[in-house]
Image (tube, rainbow, N blue to C red):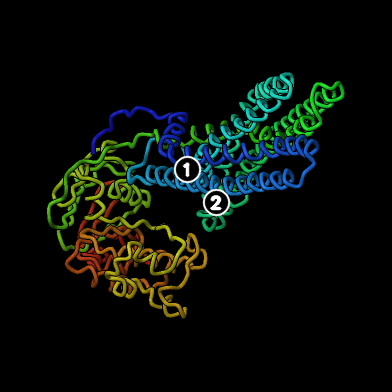
Amino acid sequence: MKTPETARPRPGAAILRTALRRNIGAMIAGTVLMGLYQAAETAFPIALGLIVEHTMQDRSLGSLGVSIGSLAVIITTVSLSWRFGMRVLQKANTTEAHRWRVEVAACALQPVARDVDLKSGEILTVATEDADQTADIIEVVPLLISSLVAIVVAAVALSLADLRLGLLVMVGTVAILSVLAVMSRRIGASTQEQQARVARAGAKVADLIIGLRPLHGFGGNHAAFGAYRKVSTDAKRQAITVARVNGTYAGTALALNAALATAVSLTAGRLAFEGRITIGELVMAVGLAQFIMEPLKMFSEMPKYVMMARASAERMALVLNAPPVTTPGPERPEPGGTLEVDGVHHGTLQGAKFTVAEGEFVAIAAYQPRAAADLAAVLAVNAAPQTYGGVVRVGGREIGDLSIEAVREHLLVNPYDGEIFAGTLRTNIDPSGSGREIAEAVEASMLTDVVALHREGLDHVVRDRGANLSGGQRQRLSLARALAADTDVLVLHDPTTAVDAVTEQLIARNVAKLRRGRTTLVLTSSPALLDAADRVLVLDGGVITAEDTHRNLLAGDEAYCLAVAR
């Protein structure tokens, strides 16, 4: 893995342009259909005016029949064009939102952390709410154009009756948009700040849920709840501010639109009274003044949605523009399962050095838990190779020269707090659906009692984060998933801390048996796992200080006895 080159940033405006470019076909079709819808709606009062005009002159059933048929055609056009136009636009909107969610998630789930100052909860908000609001631009633009079509058609029709009516509509529309454009900027800034605060609150509550049990253990839950309450209150205040700004915007838009419609109606009434327009033209003008309220409302709301989409796109750019800390190399490890850690300095590690030969089962007893966590981070490539000293080799190749895909195929590091996903026991054990090693992994991890406890067996539903499982069940489920992967090199970090001593003993024997002939490294203080290992390495002060079997170390190393004996 190399230090990445600086990529050209993609700001929010570029993200919006990308969304528009990718959906140009759907937007053209949607614009045509929605423009047809608005034109047909605007044609309705025009048709009514013409019907009144000609029916009063002809007073014949034929004219009435033609008029009714014309209205039926207009109503049918309104219904069908709206239905199919919105279907096209909403499908494109949903598809585009999915694309951005996947892209943001792909960036956030990089095996090596990206250089972005956002927590997982904040990135989740970006990948959901911000992706959805950014994709709304696909609907906003066609609706904006179609609303403009309605206003232009109305202005032209009114101009044919009297030029002053048409000019009143056009000048009034420009004035309304000028006022609302200024207000929409405030909405965009307020919305961006609100989403940031909501994201921070989401990240805080996610951290709180994960650490709730240990917080209760040392009495820190009240302080944590207080911190979350403060963040949540900030988000609430900003939401109230956004709601107030939105309310002011909507009220102002409605008042201005109503004022314009009233002005058109009163002007048309005065012109009719003076005999400058006919009764049919008066009916048309009054009808247009009422119908134009809807496209005016839609047209005046569009700047607000544009600013909201822009604000969300800017937040997505924070994630999408963040370069990865490293760029994976092109190489693959050589066949075999050797693992070498050569003089690694990282965190509490002060030159740790050891080798796990192919097919060997080695346990590391870390006297300082932080050292085990630092070592796991290095092996899992959560710490970029250039951020620490020393070298890690997998299959004879330096890990920095390997592609992430090759590392993941060859080496699996199962953390002590492995994530449990919503789904079933089966999908958590075998996410890819390969079906390999599931039965053996379930038996080795002692998950058999959980499977037998439910009638659905492996198809028993698991809630998000394993909320309906105990701590020991979640840990065994995570272990089963790691064992089922059957990788050449498996690293387990404290896989049995939440299970009882009897179960722990059985798991140790089962893991050693299942992984026989495969390279396995366990970071643990469990006597059962240490005893099952071929040899034990003692990690103290950031370096390997002793090496022997568990029983020999117990017999001759007092510090080891104090550290691992229970």
Q: Nearer the viewer, mark 2 or mark 1?
A: 1
The answer to whether the residues at label 2 and label 1 have Cβ atoms under 8 Å apart is no
**Residue 324 spot, x, y in % from top left:** 33, 37
> Disc 2 and disc 1: Cα gap in Å?
17 Å
Local packing at callout 2 (Cα closer than 10 Å; few below 14, some 14-19, many 20+) is some
Secondary structure type for disc 1: helix
Point 23% across, 60% down: residue = 487
Q: Is residue 479 left or right of residue 208?
A: left
**Residue 122 spot, x, y in % from top left:** 50, 42
Q: Which part of the image, by quadrant, shows the N terminus?
A: top left
Local packing at callout 1 (Cα closer than 10 Å; few below 14, some 14-19, many 20+) is many
> Which amino acid lies under the numbered mark 1 shown in the image of this protein?
Ile
Disc with the residue nearer the chain's start (2 vs 1): 1
**Residue 557 spot, x, y in % from top left:** 26, 60
Quarter-of-image position of residue 521: bottom left
Point 63% across, 24% down: residue = 181
Q: Is residue 403 left or right of residue 191?
A: left
Point 28% across, 32% down: residue = 4
- Picture layout, residue 524 above or below residue 189: below
- Is residue 219 in sight in this rendering? yes
- Work out which residue is located at the far right of the displayed protein and give it: 273
Instruction: Read off the residue under disc 2.
Output: 208
Instruction: Read off the residue under disc 1.
Output: 123
- Is residue 559 in sight in this rendering? no
Secondary structure type for disc 2: helix
Q: Nearer the viewer, residue 333 or 190?
A: 190
Q: Is residue 95 left or right of residue 66?
A: left
- Picture layout, residue 416 above or below residue 233: below
- Picture layout, residue 64 above or below residue 554: above
- Picture layout, residue 523 above or below residue 181: below
